[in-house]
Amino acid sequence: MAPTNRRLGRPIGTVFTAGSAALIAVLAYYEVLSYWFTGTDTIPLIETSRVSTLEGVLGIFAGPLMEGSAFTERALFYRPIASLSYAIDYAIWGLDPFGYHLTDLLLHATAAALVVWLVTEALDDRLTAAIAGWLFALHPLSVEVVPAPARRHDVLATVFALVALCLFIRATRTISRETGKRADAGKSANRNWWSSKARRRWPLVGASVLSYLLAIGSKEIGALVPILIGTWFLLACYDRRPSIRRTVRSGIVLLNPYAVATAGYLTLRFAVLGGLGGYDRPVWSSSGEPIAVTVSRYVLSLVYPVDFLGALSGLDLQLIPNGLYVALAGTCLLVVYNVSRTRSDRSILASARGRLLALSGVWLVVPVWLFVRTGRYTVRSGYISIVPVAVVLAVLLVTAARNVAARRQEATHEHVVTDTTGVESKATPRAGPGLATLVVVCLLCLSLVAGSALLNPYAEWERAGDISEDTLKATSEGVAGTPANATIDVAPVPHPRSARRLSSFPHAQSVTFVWGNTISSWLRLQGYAGEQEFYINDTVVLTEMPRGTTATVERQDGHYRLTIHYEERCRSSADGERSSAGTTPDDRNVSGRTSAAAVCGKQRDATERRNATDRREEGEPTRDTGSIDDTSDTDDAGGMLTRPPRGAPVR
């Protein structure tokens, strides 16, 4: 009866463990439910994804991302699953930001729970699985993704990739179970390796293939799934040591559905986009930031996303990649040395722990090639790589802690063993990760938890949403009387650097505000029938939350100029100084206005000087029709909408 109860308790324990990871994810990010729309491209994505008929739904699968907008003139992406998620949200919630943030929150919590499932399937260690899920839920890099609905693509791709991988591991678990049956099992075991449980295996493989298609349909990074599945297949075969012929034949049979699915996806993508797609610059171009900087930013964003030492010392570690490489190389050598030490004569890859670490290593390395070839790495793109980082840290933490505890016990209770000849000797010390590895991993885990959204407010996302809401509402009132086909220059809009000025350490690195495409889509969602073209001519770095936002429009040389006014709080302080002055009422009014003008003038001059410096440093254009430069850490879909969306949109 005991074995039966143990078997029944395992899935229940896994569910509770996965639920704890999901709960931590919700507790860390539940405040996003009160935010307004955040991210430059959230509103354009909603506007271009609206459908009300079956033809509109089919149109999502027959057109590129943000079809009907100028974005398709500078970049072509095929992400129908992500677009469909916005369409569903709009059908349920309309323009209520709560629903969109709720979807993102639930997706992040689901991803954390799936990390627990992945480790449980591969390692069957509930403690390691729990820690991996908790680390994923709290990793500071997710602050760049979860609060912005425009970056849902990465979360969706991660969720479906995890489902595909977990299902495949479950389908092939019999491989690892049968690895203990060595040559003494005879050829009969080899004959039944793939055929004995095929009826139960193939439905899981079919569901895994479907999840893979959903992942790659959410974002191109989903193409990582076949590589991970092929890696796991080879790792599962490693210890069994079958013949090369049998391995190749079995691999073709089991992996062929993924190859067929990939071929079908590429055929559809080429038919819809007219090619592979991507940004307007060559896909295989390595131009952009130096490779060392790209790799450094990728590694730092995963293992050291919050620069606590830099905040204390005034140094920016992201600017010294060589120093990072020295520390990283030393840490890797320490980890590899400790993990590879074992008293068994079997290879580390023959153990479940070794296979999981090897899979995580491939998961971490493969995306680097993509970032290097495209010439840039944006922080949000590292979301899917949080999974292997959380897994590796959890495995090393638990293994090292257990080994250290076992060694202490062995040292306390020293015992003697007797060999077959009757000679007594001391027991061999336990091998594997030790105290040094435990200290290093603990420091990394503590830094990730300390920088998480559970312990830090990251209020800049909320403030960015409030400022964007006020800006768009003021713009709607300002353009109400302009012609339907007017060309409107807008100035200024908040610069992304405003987010850092409005927040305290630690802060999100890629918060964005409105842009030309945001304004155009917002007006259409509000029912404006016009097709005005909006150009951003200037930006402003806000140092505090405005008291109010207004907009004025004037005609200049055949086009219109819309000026946005952010009311400064210095007026309130000037009024307070005026009321306390010992003068007559008339004198107080005059001196108060003079004082207010002087104070605001000084602050305005200082702000303008900072803005000019920021623009010179970043090479910001003076006139743009779409999103901010794609090489910065902004949303990955942008552009000014100039035509209505597909199908029969709901107004």
Image (cartoon, rainbow, N blue to C red):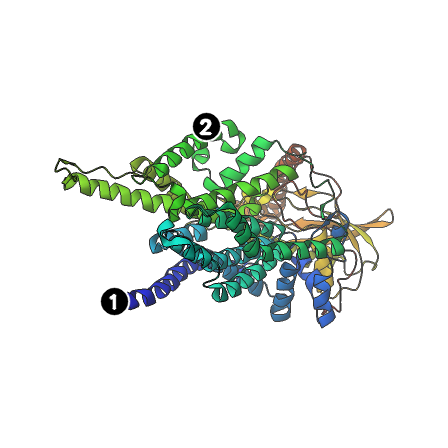
The residue indicated by pointer 1 is 2
Q: Earlier along the polypeptide chain: callout 1 or callout 2?
A: 1
Would you identify the image quadrant in which residue 86 lies? bottom right
Q: Nearer the viewer, residue 7 or 449?
A: 7
Q: Position of residue 18 (x, y in %)?
A: 41, 60
Amino acid on which the number 1 mark rests in the picture: Ala
Q: Nearer the viewer, residue 344 or 480?
A: 344
Q: Is residue 585 left or right of residue 176?
A: right
Q: Residue at x 64, y 51 (%)?
A: 40
Q: Residue at x 53, y 40 (%)?
A: 365
Q: Which element carries disc 1, helix, strand or loop? A: helix
Q: Position of residue 24 (x, y in %)?
A: 41, 57
Would you identify the image quadrant in which residue 254 lies? bottom right
The residue indicated by pointer 2 is 326
Q: Is residue 621 visible?
A: yes
Q: Which element carries disc 2, helix, strand or loop? A: helix
Q: Nearer the viewer, residue 536 or 70?
A: 70
Of labels 1 and 2, the one closer to you = 1
Q: Is residue 642 left or right of residue 373?
A: right
